[in-house]
Amino acid sequence: MIIAIPYEHGEIDQHFGKTKFFKFYLVEDKKVTFVRVIPSDGEGHAAISSFLKQCQVDTIICGNIGAGALRAMELAHIDVYGGVEGNCDDSLLDFINGELKYNKDISCTVEGDSCCNSDCSSCSHDCYNDKSSN
């Protein structure tokens, strides 16, 4: 399972659509086997959903997320655990242990937010081309 968290200085970036980095975790048998911070592929939910889909992300843990971004994640078949604050690593461990506190009804309303109506498949990143860790 690949889990991505919008990342800013070790904390969950609270503005999903403008995050500059994601922290990626590969989790196998409830153990983290790979960690890497990767720059996002632009701003906005269409660019970010395309980037996450290309990186084969299964799940995101995030803070605030708009309705358009939620729809884009749904179209990309990515599970969303929103409304989470705090340290990325701690939140991931809470998720793995079934203790993550999140808001299943999260949706922030931002003026100009709109649904992603494309297939979101234009990302050119090679997200796992080495095994370096951050």
Image (cartoon, grey):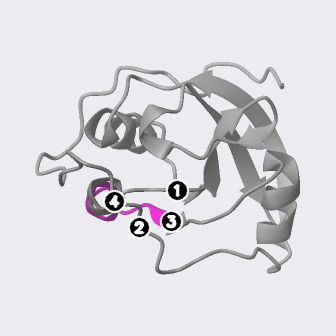
Q: Name the residue: 79% across, 58% down.
A: 92
- Of badges 3 and 4, nearer the viewer stands 4
Q: Name the residue: 41% across, 67% down.
A: 107
- Of badges 4 and 2, nearer the viewer stands 4
Above or below: residue 45 compared with residue 124: below
Residue at the spot of label 1: 64
- Residue 110, position in %: x, y? 32, 51
Residue toward you, 91 or 13: 13
Residue 24 placement: quadrant: top right
Residue 36 placement: quadrant: top right
Does residue 52 appear to the left or right of 21 in the view shown?
A: left
Residue at the spot of label 2: 107
Q: Give the Cα distance between marks 1 and 4.
A: 9 Å
Badge 1, how many Cα within 10 Å: few under 14, some, many 20+? some
Which range is magenta? 72-79
Residue at the spot of label 4: 109
Looking at the rendered structure, the secondary structure element under dot 3 is strand
Q: Give the Cα distance between marks 2 and 1.
A: 7 Å
Looking at the rendered structure, the secondary structure element under dot 1 is loop
Q: Name the residue: 78% across, 36% down.
A: 35
